[in-house]
């Protein structure tokens, strides 16, 4: 049994290219006691991965060079020497960009199959992505009933979850920004946002002011840059920002100036708090229960953008950074073994 | 009985000048029932006043044009029609830049005289200034025992209180920046800072890195600009900033770019929180008790820079903005009536 794996071989400057990666074929050894072998169905490509390709200090250490890219994946057990992981089980793991994963059973979490929900949902609406939205709104931004909530990158995997969870938690008004008219339609049509705009059409500051004439209370930031600046202008007193990512700056070479209106933080008593979902894993059980209920009641929906073939994983990752996805971007690696 | 008062007559662009103010003489009417008349001893000039001279939205509304500047003052009751405010009482009030204040007794808070402590202390170490330091460290930045604490503008009224309170609350290391070698000596010599540097000598980033080789956990920001940028670079994971003011930008015309390293907020899970002391007045009783104890035990000390004569109030205010003060800047208006 062979495993095809994608490794990081050099640290990108600016936009990553195919040259920063290589594909290797590994012959897998016999299963050891307590190990399982998993044929992956879907691999996750996520914005945070770009940050981990740099060699900078962070909560999460950088990816190691010449090792297989780690990250979320979901698959099915094809061979097992663990009683808790019988052949056929669907499992989620963090062993990343490979078609077959083999390791100690403790590395794999068995999940249940839900009628009508693809297993790829465990990488998105039932996984780390939506947990990020869930804790960012509640634990970080401390959203209250009646708040006006603004989320950037709202048609992405995290953003679309933020908008829907905000609605369920009783937000007074939910506003999203996205990068195309089609995505904007999706926000107000499918995801229940009260207002949405295309940030490529005119300045974010102007569009946000129009969409939130009474100001905003919570901002969930996936983008940074002019979006954060616009939010700082629109905030009501005591407003709170959950800083989740700054995809607008991930591939910038050199430094990017911050918002030109930082003084509003003092005068309006604002809070900006950055977070990484890895520090909120203790919230997973409650999240899983809530989200399972919301999904089954039809109160939450989701989109996926699926790229086929492990050989297209890097391209899928770059496309996600360019905003080509709607909802969660995943790579389907087939389930043919 | 006449009262000399200083009014704001136009909103400054950039640095205020004498032309933005005028001095008026008012004849005071007979005292009404329940009113008191106070001969002021000291007027307060504070950084936040510069912000209130602009006509911008803030927690605190802007100063009204053609009205007497409001703000902290301390004086002595010279005539009274209130039983709780006998002649001779020392009172603190917010009626601002005038030599004689007259109003309903409810506007004046009677304070006790303390042996060896000038009544001007009620504008500084026993007043709003030190309350700002007290709540900023505890309620906003949530300082913990063992934290490394950095404060900018550390030889100012707020900053010198921050350093000393941090020490009392068990900070592991206290670092301050100030604008002259003399002030730096004061920080380490008199106020018990572990390290201090002159921000005019070389880049703040470099000096802070040297003073805090193991990083910082809390930053109390009175300055903004390159100080905030340096702090964002020096923060350990989970670091917290209390944003109190940005004196470096108060007189800037147009906008100032923010820090170029905002991405650290996400990757290190930092929190930036702005605050205005007016939202923490409920903490005053506990503050007064703690600070009274610390002062009497000699665990807290303070400096004042006193400018004489109400006619020099605007100049005192400008001097404070230029950093000419050590500790609290107050105007002595005599106690001759």
Image: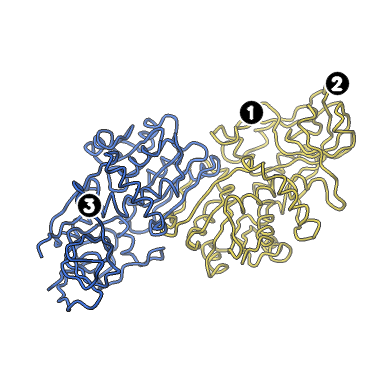
Chain colours: A blue, B yellow
Across and down, in percent, residue A34 comes to: 25, 74
Q: Alpha-carbon neighbours of circle 2 within 10 Å: few (<14), some, or many (≥20)?
A: few
> Which quarter of the picture shows residue A163?
top left
Q: Are marks 1 and 3 in contact (CB under 8 Å)?
A: no
Q: Is residue A234 something that shows in the picture?
A: no
Q: Considering the image in quadrants, where does the N terminus of chain A appear?
A: bottom left
Front disc: 2 or 1: 2
Residue closest to the eye, B291 or B251: B291
Q: Residue at x 81, y 32 (%)?
A: B100
Residue B318 located left or right of residue B207: right
Q: Chain of mark 3?
A: A
The span from disc 1 to disc 3 (Cα, nearest Å) is 55 Å
Disc nearer the start of the sequence (2/1): 2
Kindly state the secondary structure of the residue where label 1 is placed.
Answer: loop
Residue B291 position in % (x across, y down): 74, 53
Within 10 angstroms of label 3, few (less than 14), some, or many (20 or more) residues? many
What's the distance in space between the residues labelled 2 and 1, CA to CA? 26 Å
Q: Residue at x 57, y 36 (%)?
A: B59
Q: Which residue is under mark 1?
A: B64
Mark 2 secondary-structure assignment: loop
x, y percentage for residue A279? 42, 59
Residue situated furthest front in the rendering: A83
Return the residue at label 2.
B30
Q: Which mark is residue A329?
A: 3
The reply to whether label 1 and label 3 mark residues of one chain is no
Name the front one of labels 1 and 3. 3
Dot 1 alpha-carbon crowd within 10 angstroms: few under 14, some 14 to 19, many 20 or more: some
Give me the chain letter of mark 1: B
- Between A93 and B146, the residue placed more toward the observer is A93
User: Circle 2 marks a residue in which chain?
Assistant: B
């Amino acid at each position: 049994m062979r495993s095809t794996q994608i490794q990081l071989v050099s640290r990108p400057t600016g936009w990553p290219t195919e040259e920063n990666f290589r594909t290797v074929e590994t012959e897998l050894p016999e299963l050891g006691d307590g190990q399982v072998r998993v044929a992956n169905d879907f691999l996750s490509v996520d914005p945070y991965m770009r940050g981990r390709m740099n060699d900078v200090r962070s909560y999460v250490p950088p990816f190691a060079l010449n090792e297989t890219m780690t990250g979320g994946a979901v698959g099915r057990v094809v061979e097992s020497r663990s009683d808790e992981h019988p052949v056929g089980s669907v499992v989620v793991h963090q062993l990343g960009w490979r078609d077959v994963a083999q390791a100690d059973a403790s590395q794999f979490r068995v999940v249940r199959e839900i009628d009508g929900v693809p297993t790829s949902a465990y990488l998105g609406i039932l996984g780390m992505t939506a947990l990020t939205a869930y804790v960012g709104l509640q634990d970080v931004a401390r959203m209250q009933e009646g708040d006006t909530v603004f989320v950037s990158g709202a048609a992405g995997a995290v953003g679309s979850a933020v908008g829907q969870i905000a609605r369920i938690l009783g937000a007074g008004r939910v506003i999203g920004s996205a990068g195309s008219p089609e995505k904007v339609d999706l926000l107000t049509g499918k995801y229940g946002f009260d207002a949405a705009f295309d940030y490529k059409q005119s300045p974010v500051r102007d569009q946000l002011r129009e969409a939130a004439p009474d100001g905003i209370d919570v901002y969930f930031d996936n983008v940074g840059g002019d979006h954060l600046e616009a939010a700082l202008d629109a905030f009501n007193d005591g407003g709170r920002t959950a800083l989740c990512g700054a995809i607008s700056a991930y591939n910038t070479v050199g430094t990017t100036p911050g918002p030109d209106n930082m003084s509003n933080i003092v005068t309006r008593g604002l809070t900006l708090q950055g977070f990484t979902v890895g520090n909120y894993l203790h919230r997973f059980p409650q999240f899983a229960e809530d989200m399972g209920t919301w999904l089954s009641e039809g109160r939450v929906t989701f989109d996926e953008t699926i790229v086929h073939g492990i050989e297209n994983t890097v391209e899928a990752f770059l496309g996600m950074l360019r905003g080509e996805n709607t909802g969660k971007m995943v790579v389907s690696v087939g389930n043919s073994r």
